[in-house]
Image (cartoon, helix red, strand yellow):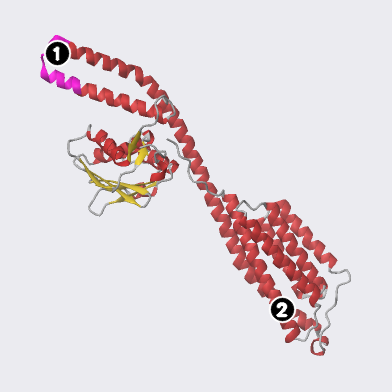
Amino acid sequence: MTVPSPTTALPEADAGRRNMTLLIQLRWLAVGGQLATIAVARSLMDIALPLAPLLAAITVLVAINFASLALLARGRAVTNAELTAALLFDVAALAWQLHHSGGLTNPFASLFLLQVVIGAILLTPRSSWAIVAATLAGLATLRIDPTPLLLPPRYAHDPFALYLQGSLVCFVLIAVLLVAFVTRINRNLRDRDAALAAARQRAAEEDHIVRMGLLASGAAHELGTPLSTLSVLIGDWKKEPDIARHGELQADLADMDAAVQRCKTIVSGILMSAGEARGEAPRLTTMRAFLTATIEDSRAVRLPGSIEFNDLFGADVPIVSDPALRQVIGNVLDNAAEISPDWTGVTASRDGDMAVIEIADRGPGFSEDMLESFGRPYSSTKGRPGGGLGLFLLVNVLRKLGGGASVANRDAGGALVRITLPLSALAAPEGES
């Protein structure tokens, strides 16, 4: 049974939404700063400002913010065109305000530089140059009949000193905003790059699994005929009169027949997991029966009593048996029994809607390199070519089912593999049990 993994936002979409959120926050700061500047200029400095056009621009910025919030509420990706449009509105609003407050003589004209830097970081090269062109056009329009500022007498005799003070305030404002917001934007971009790298790694792993599945399916087909031949030959030998009289030979033949039947079961499981041999309906069972059968299969080829099963699962639940899941859990059990032949502990419990399976052994445990590279293909402590695929397959099968796996070293010695699996991933259809 294949269960699609939960959908997650693409890295580009997530970065675009976070960058739009930053623009909204920057715009709220601009609205607050502009209202504070107007209040200081009129109340403390007695500078007459045209309130109507300035407040109209602030109203437009507030409206853009609400429109941007509505855009984010839709839950889809924020495109480069939408980010560009938002920045162009900011440039136009700043140009409008400067035009009605002195034009190029207003020291806050340097705020255009902030728009250019943000555009260069957030947008594609073509869109970034569009922001540059918009700011240059804005500066050019400020030379066309701007509304001059009427300064009170204490500033009128030396307007350049007031300009220098305003320039200093503007420099500090730009520096603080650039450090605060560009740092956050770069962090968003690094998170996006990390998410893209993880997605590429996951795609490579899934491609590796597909190729392994094709090889396993081909090998299973090739093994079917010789296994059937061996089964027929063993049956014929059992019927031979000379062999029938030897109890030890009969016992050996029975062991050989059991081993061949186990191999045939494994081959059938590989074909079923690969999407073949689907003539039979999926087998309905329960979680406890599924775990018990998996453990019994491993016990059949190990020392009697070497696997200890602690059932703390609680109330049983109906599920559809997943051959791939059974196979990867069996691989972990085989690995644990191989490294710790005298004892392997299996504990099944439940954490809310999650099934938790812990497999422990008394071996040497995992090395630091193994703990860091857990789940990667060909990462193994056995030193065999092609080793390390058991845990790799476990991680990827669980990921497809919405679960996960982790490894650790036990305080008492040995290794511990912890499997978590949502019960909904294996839930039996309603009305069936």
Relative height, residue 261 to residue 370 (above, below): above
Do we see residue 123 in this rendering?
Answer: yes
Instruction: Answer with the quarter of the image where residue 378 lies.
Output: top left
Mark 2 Cα shell of 10 Å, populated few (<14), some (14-19), many (≥20): few
Callout 2 amino acid: Thr
Q: Which residues fall within the magenta stretch?
A: 240-254
**Front residue of 278 and 189:** 278
Callout 1 amino acid: Ile
Relative height, residue 326 to residue 420 (above, below): above
Q: Is residue 327 left or right of residue 192?
A: left
Seen as rendered, the residue at the extreme top is 241
Q: Is residue 242 magenta?
A: yes
Query: What predominant SS class does the magenta segment belong to?
Result: helix
Question: What is the spatial separation of the Cα atoms under label 2 and label 1, in whole angstroms?
Answer: 105 Å
Q: What percent of the width, then of the height, locates residue 410?
A: 26, 52
Mark 1 Cα shell of 10 Å, populated few (<14), some (14-19), many (≥20): some
Q: What percent of the width, then of the height, locates residue 330?
A: 31, 36
Q: In the image, which disc is placed on residue 243?
A: 1
Q: In the image, which disc is placed on residue 37?
A: 2
Q: Give whichever of discs 2 and 1 has the lower sequence position.
A: 2
Relative height, residue 270 to residue 249 (above, below): below
Q: In the image, which disc is placed on residue 307?
A: none
Instruction: Answer with the quarter of the image where residue 319 lies.
Output: top left
Q: What percent of the width, then of the height, locates residue 5?
A: 48, 43
**Marks 2 and 1 in Cβ contact (< 8 Å):** no
Q: What percent of the width, then of the height, locates residue 335?
A: 29, 39
